[in-house]
Image: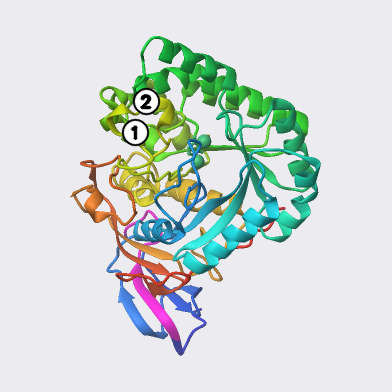
Amino acid sequence: MWAFELSVDLIVRNARVGSNPDIVTDIAVSDGIVQELGAAAASGDTEIDALGALVTPGGVDPHCHMAQISSTGVPTDDDIHSGTWSAINGGTTTVGAFAVQHRGDQVRDVVNAMVDRVSREAVADVALHLILTEWSESIKSDLDWVLDRGIVSLKIFTTYDRLRLAPDAVIDAMAAAGRHGMSIMVHAEDDVMITEGRSRAIATGLTDARGHQESHSRLAESAGVAEALRFADRADVPIYLVHISTAGSLDEIRSARSKGAAVTVESCPHYLWLDEALLQGDLTTTAAFMSSPPLRGAEDREALWAALVAGEIDVVASDHSPYRMDAGKLPNGNATVFTEVANGMPGVEMRMPLMMSAVADGRLTLERALEACCTTPAQFLGVYPQKGALLPGSDADLVIWDTGVERTVHHRDLHDAVDYTPYEGLRVTTWPSQVLFRGQPVGRSSSPGSASYLKRQVSS
Ligand code: DUC
Ligand code: ZN
Ligand code: ZN
């Protein structure tokens, strides 16, 4: 029975909210919240006819770098405003970004500063994780305060000189996170192998992207993953493994899961779509495609797709790392060597269109895509079902999709502050035709601060 006999703020009519194209529904929205789904007798102050198009909840991208300093010491070119503007134009209405405690920083200062920036600049909602680059009794004693500020996950690195924690600190930080009901995100690569590989590459004159590729080897990743899983087991904490890129890492994860490990596994569109051949050639081109871990080959990509289809990969996040080619990617122009390149690729705007195109192309079910891009990341962020769901009571963050398109990706059509997309020239078949954020159509611009900092809750 439709409960809204009179008027609501907005009705999206004839929306297809599942995979069956014959079943459409009306979505009633008031005060920015979904009120009801059904055959609406009510009228809306505004009405949008979706004409049977697919309508999904807004995407939730839990791993985005914005207004942050990279491992090479340069700032991202997206701030919170441009990064969230890019996100929302690609159908992602909630992002997880990072407050970073660089060495010597006070946790409370960096968290307060980032919450303040988000409140002033965001145009899509933002939740935060806290990156820790050192570990001390004083940081430990701040964790209750961190929780109180709405941050329920810590991120640590096992490599990068500026960022990494020593192994004993990793275990202690994990244990402290566990005692606080927090989860721990880990960039897991074996630092010894990477350091040795880097020195060898430089000594043999391999100073371009292949030096990066060889030092951040497949084995360095799976060894780092295996160790992180052992440490999390020892510390008794749920672990979230970011940017998994190899079949070998998936094997380690399967083995840990068979013994009962609580692990959430993330991969990223660039590992699913892009091939390591893009790292061959001059650094002035290949720096665009450099990430940590690096792009891999067809065998790993096939393993990742199979794991995503099977539900072994829980989350697809962009790991949006926006560095311009004329800045952080090539800080010394033509003379740049691979160790100086800021790692990562921009991707927050392309994640949902790529994943929804994979659905249209029959590579993935709609249900799996929504789990990986909306539901599970929202649960991990502790904001479900406010976010990541299309249910009565959820925020009316809705994306109406154009599923029958033949479109070529061009950076000039995107909204970030970077100067390229790694997906330039790719053909996609699905693109957002309209995005609604808290019941309001996203227009040509959006005023900074129109979205919110999301205080997260420890999930039970
Ligand atoms: N790791 C990340 O998680 N993001 C950007 C770069 C990196 O190495
Ligand atoms: Zn990382
Ligand atoms: Zn990242």
Camera-side residue: 266 or 330? 330
Residue 337 has which mark?
2
Camera-side residue: 39 or 311? 311
Q: How far across and down, in percent of the image, does residue 326 sit?
A: 30, 42
Instruction: Identify the magenta region.
Output: 8-21
Q: Residue furthest bottom?
A: 6
Q: Which residue is denoted by mark 1 in the rendering?
A: 332
Q: Secondary structure at mark 1?
A: loop
Q: How far across and down, in percent of the image, does residue 65 sit?
A: 48, 48
Residue 269 vertical placement versus 214 (above, below): below
Name which residue lies at 69% across and 60% down: 149
Question: Seen in the image, is 71 located left or right of residue 212?
Answer: right
Residue 133 vertical placement versus 209 (above, below): below
Give whichever of discs 2 and 1 has the lower sequence position: 1
The quadrant holding residue 18 is bottom left
The amino acid beneath tag 1 is Asn
Mark 1 Cα shell of 10 Å, populated few (<14), some (14-19), many (≥20): few
The amino acid beneath tag 2 is Val
Q: How far across and down, in percent of the image, does residue 387 sit?
A: 53, 61
The quadrant holding residue 151 is bottom right
Camera-side residue: 48 or 31? 31
